[in-house]
Amino acid sequence: MEKQHPVAAENKSKMKQYKLIISAVFLVLTALSFACYFIAPGSQWYEKPVPVELQPKVPVMENPLLNAKHEEEAEPEPVQSEQPKKEAPKTDPKAWKEGLPGIAFIGDSIMAGYGCSKDLDPSKDEKCPNSAANIEADLIGYEHYNFENLSLGAEQSQAYDAAMDANYLKTYITDKKIKYVQIMLGTNDALAGGVTKLWTKDNYRTALSEMIRKLESAGVQKIIIHRPTYIIGQNRENTRASNDNISLDEYLLVMDDIANQDPAVFMGDTAAADWFANVGANGDNYDIYGIHPNAKGHEILGKFWYDAFKRVLGAEYEGK
């Protein structure tokens, strides 16, 4: 066998190594080419990355022990006490309302409201809120009218006439837009004139006529005169025959005469006096002993005045 030259054998060995290296490089390049082809964008094998907002959220597992520790360390929130709600101030339905016409009461102690308190304490005879004038005002209603009670008490007509100076008329009549005035006067005039002879029918006529003139000049459109009640004693059969009431009947004729002469003056209630002297005698619930009615008597009297007021006003009436 022919021996190869050492150099030739060495060269042959190197050639085999070169071939192996070249083959390995070729295989690597081939593999890279295939990989680039299959994962390149647009390839059917290419998978687009999923946007972050569309990726499924992996729930975070809470550590109850850690949370409990944080809750212990956290400062408690201050408790806010509930503040009471402020209620809107309530409006008194009987309060004076600007722009409404006014109704005024001018009279004796009955119109002022004396007598109601006798039901609670017979020894007392004081003014009370459920007077006949207030009963009538409640029946008429406070939606269309204002009400003013100018009654003084045990006074004769002369006292009212003297009080009605320019300042009085402006303050209580004109400025308050009093459109209607209801008057009940005569009992105290009759007592003074019939018993003591200090106050005559002529004085009464003069004073009442002058009052009416002043009220009309202050803007009052209608004046309504209610007939006073009789002074009723325990023995009702003798009520009409008493000197006081005989005197009062004469004063009632003066009222009628004044109402007939002045187109702005009207006779109002004329039935209550007879009702108390007759029908009211059937039970203590409706009594007037002496001059002043009790609470039930004021309620009945207020209804009489209410009916008379509506009758006088007719189509002008705007109440209930």
Image (cartoon, helix red, strand yellow):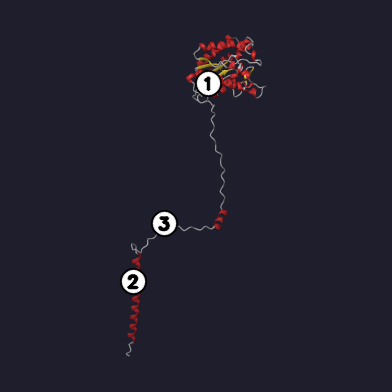
Pointer 1 and pointer 3: residues touching (CB < 8 Å)? Answer: no
Task: Report the amino acid beneath label 3.
Answer: Leu
**Residue 1 vs residue 307, the one in the foreground:** 307
Lateral position of residue 252 relative to residue 7, left or right = right
Task: Report the amino acid beneath label 1.
Answer: Ile
The dot on residue 30 is 2
Task: Report the amino acid beneath label 2.
Answer: Thr
What separation in Å lies between label 1 and label 2 (alpha carbons)? Answer: 118 Å
Give the x, y percent position of residue 48.
37, 61
Give the x, y percent position of residue 94.
54, 26
Depicted 247 relative to depicted 135: above or below: above
Question: Mark 1 vs mark 3: which is more N-terminal?
Answer: 3
Give the x, y percent position of residue 200.
60, 9
Is residue 139 visible in the rendered image? The answer is: yes
Depicted 6 relative to depicted 268: above or below: below
The dot on residue 119 is none
**Residue 7 vs residue 177, the one in the foreground:** 177
* Residue marked by disc 3: 54
